[in-house]
Image (spheres, helix red, strand yellow):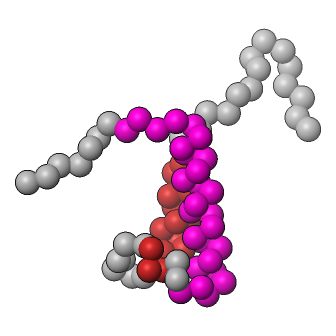
């Protein structure tokens, strides 16, 4: 029986590429282009847009944004 690989060796560029591809597929789905639906795995409720949004949110939440701690932070 096969097992899932739990160790990934992805670079930041790989993660950016995945995010960009997910955004393109999400855009195509919202525009009604059915060709992109064939690229996605079967889903129980066929709500791929919500699944893509959740995945993009999880990717975003794992990012650590730099904020200097030794000087006052001025936004904008």
Type of secondary structure dominating the magenta stretch: helix
Q: Is residue 42 above or below residue 55?
A: below
> In this orientation, does residue 39 appear?
yes
- In the image, is 67 to the left or to the right of 35? right
Q: Is residue 27 above or below residue 20?
A: below
Which residue does the image show at 86% across and 19% down from the upper left? Answer: 72
- In the image, is 14 to the left or to the right of 74? left
Which residue does the image show at 52% across and 36% down from the upper left? Answer: 11
Of residue 68 and residue 35, the one placed in the foreground of this image is: 35
Which residue does the image show at 84% across and 15% down from the upper left? Answer: 71
> In this orientation, does residue 61 appear?
no
Q: Is residue 1 magenta?
A: no
Q: Of all residues shown, which one is farthest toward the top? A: 70
Percent of width and height locating residue 3 = 17, 49
Numbered range of the magenta stretch: 8-34
Percent of width and height locating residue 15 = 55, 45
Percent of width and height locating residue 35 = 52, 83
Which residue does the image show at 8% across and 54% down from the upper left? Answer: 1
């Amino acid at each position: 029986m096969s097992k899932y690989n739990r160790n990934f060796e992805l670079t930041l560029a790989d993660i950016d590429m995945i995010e960009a591809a997910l955004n393109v597929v999400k855009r195509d789905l919202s525009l009604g282009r059915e060709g992109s639906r064939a690229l996605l795995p079967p889903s129980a409720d066929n709500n791929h847009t919500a699944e893509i949004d959740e995945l993009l949110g999880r990717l975003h939440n794992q990012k650590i944004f730099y904020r200097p701690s030794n000087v006052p932070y001025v936004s904008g």
